[in-house]
Image: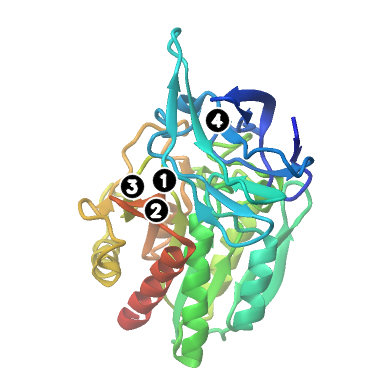
């Protein structure tokens, strides 16, 4: 093949790469590497042109029904950039069905580039985080170590002071490392809060809840040995991952230095969902969603509005099947509610809202709306 597959960079993910042919044109055929997870979804790779006359290749994503929410691929629009330029969306996938029932999906890739970079959704890693820090002046603190010895980072707009009544916001993102819309939403939120200066709440942020997964290109949902967002303690009161222990300690330090207003846990849902933004409202220990949590969901739905907020069922209670016992393996937002903190898990689609396909601009605008909603009601 006249293209070289490059996986030697942070956040890359692909396996089983093979050269095939689609309608007489070359194609790169691959599937996401599970990387310690029963679910797959995230992929990212580069193709470097070896022959100046090489025709544009196709992307063939194999085993697409094995992706979480992948379906037949027709609802998926991965992203691409040429020669390090701006990211853009590919068209909807073309399902490829076989006589034995298997299903792949394919996409045409752009022609005019020496290097093509392709990913499931807009990537966000350390380079993008560094740009955010430079633009906002946020402080960066190392507050622990990951399972593989990488620093756990916290961003903040100040240390606060014990007993302070300044409103406080705590944000978690990327507990599932492949859920990059969460980072772009966070990016917009923090840029907006930086504009507000002292009028902003005391904001402490976990930008990468699973830094190992972000760097290694893991999807991260239900990742071995325990999903980070199911490792928060329930009735037995012990966290199941060191990262979670560190995040718990950060939340406790933060709440002593402000008047806690809200904890936001930013995520992205299944691959095919085109319902924009919605929120999971965690239940308290009594099995009821606390009134302040429901009120926050209503406020943020109103603040987001069209074209981003889900048109139906914005506020949801998570009742889908889980691999983890719900009373002993809590999510971060549910643990926070059990501690008396108003908390929401906000899900932002990889794809978009109805016929609108989300761009980086959309994701940042969602973050701005969330920031304005928190400040207006704080």
Give how far apart the Cα atoms at labels 1 and 3 are: 9 Å
The local secondary structure at tag 4 comes to: strand
Q: Return the residue nearer the eye: 160 or 185.
A: 185
Mark positioned earlier in the residue sequence (3 or 2): 3
Give how far apart the Cα atoms at labels 2 and 4 are: 25 Å
Q: Are marks 3 and 2 in contact (CB under 8 Å)?
A: no
Q: Quadrant of the N terminus?
A: top right
- 24, above or below 339, in the image: above
Mark 3, residue position? 274
- Give the foreground label among 1 and 3: 3
- Give the foreground label among 2 and 4: 4
Mark 2, residue position? 347
Q: Are marks 2 and 1 in contact (CB under 8 Å)?
A: yes
- 230, above or below 88, in the image: above
Mark positioned earlier in the residue sequence (2 or 1): 1
Q: Quadrant of residue 335?
A: bottom left
Mark positioned earlier in the residue sequence (4 or 3): 4
The local secondary structure at tag 2 comes to: strand
The local secondary structure at tag 1 comes to: loop
Point out the residue furthest to the top here: 100
Q: Quadrant of residue 295?
A: bottom left
Mark positioned earlier in the residue sequence (1 or 3): 1
Mark 1, residue position? 269
Q: Return the residue nearer the eye: 155 or 124.
A: 124
């Amino acid at each position: 093949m006249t293209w070289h597959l490059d996986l030697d960079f942070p956040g890359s993910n692909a396996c089983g790469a093979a050269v095939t042919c689609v309608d007489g044109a070359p194609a790169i055929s691959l599937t996401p590497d599970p990387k310690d997870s029963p679910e797959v979804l995230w992929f990212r790779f580069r193709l470097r042109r070896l022959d100046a006359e090489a025709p544009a290749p196709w992307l063939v994503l194999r085993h697409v029904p094995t992706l979480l929410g992948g379906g037949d691929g027709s609802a998926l629009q991965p992203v691409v950039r040429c020669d390090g330029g701006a990211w853009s969306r590919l068209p909807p996938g073309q399902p490829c069905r076989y006589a034995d029932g298997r299903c792949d999906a394919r996409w045409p890739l752009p022609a005019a580039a020496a290097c093509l970079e392709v990913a499931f959704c807009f990537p966000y890693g350390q380079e993008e985080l560094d740009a955010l820090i430079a633009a906002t002046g946020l402080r960066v603190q190392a507050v622990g170590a990951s399972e593989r010895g990488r620093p756990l980072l916290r961003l903040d707009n100040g240390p606060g002071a014990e007993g302070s009544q300044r409103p406080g916001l705590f944000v978690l993102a990327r507990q599932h490392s492949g859920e990059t819309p969460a980072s772009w939403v966070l990016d917009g939120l923090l840029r907006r809060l930086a504009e507000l200066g002292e009028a902003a709440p005391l904001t402490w942020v976990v930008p990468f809840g699973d830094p190992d997964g972000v760097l290694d290109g893991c999807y991260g949902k239900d990742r071995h040995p325990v999903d980070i967002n199911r490792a928060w303690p329930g009735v037995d009161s012990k966290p199941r991952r060191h990262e979670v222990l560190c995040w718990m300690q950060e939340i406790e330090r933060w709440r002593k230095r402000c008047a806690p207003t809200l904890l936001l846990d930013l995520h992205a849902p299944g691959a095919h969902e085109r319902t924009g933004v919605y929120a999971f409202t965690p239940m308290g220990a009594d099995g009821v969603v606390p009134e302040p949590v429901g009120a926050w969901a209503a406020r943020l739905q109103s603040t987001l509005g069209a074209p981003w907020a889900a048109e139906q069922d914005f506020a949801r209670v998570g009742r889908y099947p889980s691999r983890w016992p719900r009373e002993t393996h809590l999510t971060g937002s549910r643990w926070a509610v059990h501690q008396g903190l108003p908390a929401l898990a906000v899900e932002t689609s990889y794809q978009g809202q109805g016929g609108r396909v989300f761009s980086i601009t959309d994701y940042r605008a969602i973050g701005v709306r969330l920031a304005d909603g928190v400040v207006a009601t704080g």
